[in-house]
Image: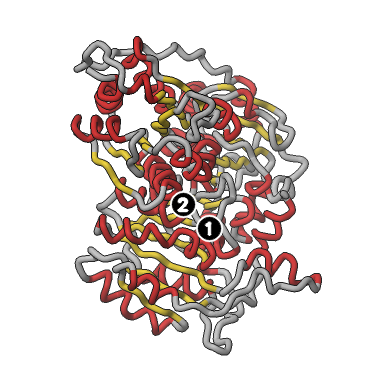
Amino acid sequence: MRVAEVVGRVLHGHGARHVFGVVGSGNFHVTNALVAAGARFVAAAHEGGAASMADGYARTCGRVAVLSVHQGPGVTNALTGLTEAAKSRTPMVVLAPEATAPLSNFFIDLPALAAAVGADFHRVRATHAAEDAGAAYRAAALGATVVLGLPLQVQSAETEPWSGPVPVVAPTPSAVPQVEPLLTALQAARRPVFIAGRGARAAREPLSRLADACGALLAVSAAAKGLFAGNRWNLDVAGGFATPLAAELIGAADLVVAWGSTLNMWTTRHGELIPPTAVVVQVDRDPAAFGVNRPVDLTVAGDVTAVAEAVLGRLGEHSTAAVPGGWRTQELARRIRDDGRWRTVPYQDEGGGTPATIDPRTLSAALDDLLPPDRTVVVDSGNFMGYPSMWLDVPDVAGFCFTQAFQSVGLGLASALGAAVARPDRLTVAAVGDGGFVMSATELVTAVRLALPLLVVIYDDAAYGAEVHHFGPDGHPLDTVTFPETDLAAIARGYGCDGLTVRTVDDLLPVRQWLAGPRTRPLVIDAKVSSAHGSWWLEEAFRGH
């Protein structure tokens, strides 16, 4: 049996069920081996799109994704999506064929490339093919993006046949978390707030129970939006997307516990959201994450779920939620219910320009009313990104995919395709800007081919709006970042999608009809949005450059 076939069989045996990519000579045999073993191959139009599809798939379903690309340019084409995945700790195995001869025009230094973007690197050896492929998959399953080097001459080498079973690797026993200082801090606090991040996405239940036991309010980073959906004490996203009420309450906390969150500049509004008098605790399984973005008073090393369960075990049935001075009152519950969503915050509608445009807040609110609750919202990067992130509700943490770890424009559409493959039972909504859409529109070919329920909403301000709002007020010329109006709906129809131009709320009526139908053709909405409303979240983003 050839090494390429062994690698495909081993990855499938470990659980690989979907493979995204573009097939060339270097990855032809290993991709076919995966398909022959039972995996589904999703062919993308471009390797960059394939990488983002794999990323969106893994984020949405929590399983390891496999990306298969050609050697050399196939790898470099995928690099931006690969970087986003690595920075987000997305569980992914990248099948990267290697031309190992330095004189080959396909040669690139794969280990250096992986290290440069924060990915792990493994290489398959002819004599240990099954072992090496299995090790790469297991590393990905623990939360790493793994570039698996497949030297061309090794792929074609004969090796021992492999047909399973998958070797059982006993998990390394985890040390019992040392939670006494955290327990003491929780018992002393009267206004605690939990901020859960990407590392807490699987810990809704224990964190909710612990918050009930100690009277904490619940918030999340943008990467974990939806984690506490439906909880009456949920403040939703902290940081740049925080509602005025959430900012007020987090700003009054006497204890902030970050669960699987590094409290970066976006989550803390450059440190201004958390009061200087609050005790700050960081819980993370990776000690290297402690204090990387701001000083913290206490740290707890361990898995978020394990730490929360350990603290609950020490607290027993005792609850401080009703202790005098605590803030879980009926009046606060009413305020969170009535004022805790952006939908309830008044604003001056700035649509109705010439030609007619729609306020992006009005657009987002109208879509939130139209769309079914069971949805997956995928947000690209750009000036528009706060509107869908703040105005569109999601049912749970799997319902929100936020492609912002690398702050690259143009990844959202393909990420949404991966999310739709992962959850075909839900409506997938890709929220993109006009710049990001034009960068990635080629993947509409893939969307049509897959016939998945996909709604693409383009917040079209005919500009790179972030630059307009950042540089415009200082009088800089904007000719390089503004563009003539383009009929993006017509472009979408050319790819085989349904296309709709929206300038008013009434123009959304066909969306209702599309939702009622079979939804086998993607619908692309070219929403001509007003650009008058500047975004404070982008002002904060530029402060971080």
Q: Earlier in the sequence, mark 2 or mark 1?
A: 2
| Secondary element type, mark 1 | helix
| Secondary element type, mark 2 | loop
Residue 441 shows up from this direction: yes
Q: Residue at x 44, y 12 (%)?
A: 172
Q: Residues within 10 Å of mark 2 (few under 14, many from 20)?
A: some
Residue 27, x across and y down, in percent = 34, 34
Q: CA distance from mark 2 to mark 1?
A: 7 Å
Residue denoted by label 2: 232
**Which numbered tag is attached to residue 336?**
1
Residue 211 shows up from this direction: no
Q: Residue at x 28, y 13 (%)?
A: 167
Q: Which quadrant of the figure contains the N terminus?
A: top left
Residue 428, x across and y down, in percent = 35, 57
Tell me which corner region of the image, top left, top right, bottom left or bottom right, holds residue 177.
top right
The answer to whether mark 2 and mark 1 are in CB contact below 8 A is yes
Q: Residue at x 27, y 15 (%)?
A: 158
Give amino acid for label 2.
Answer: Arg
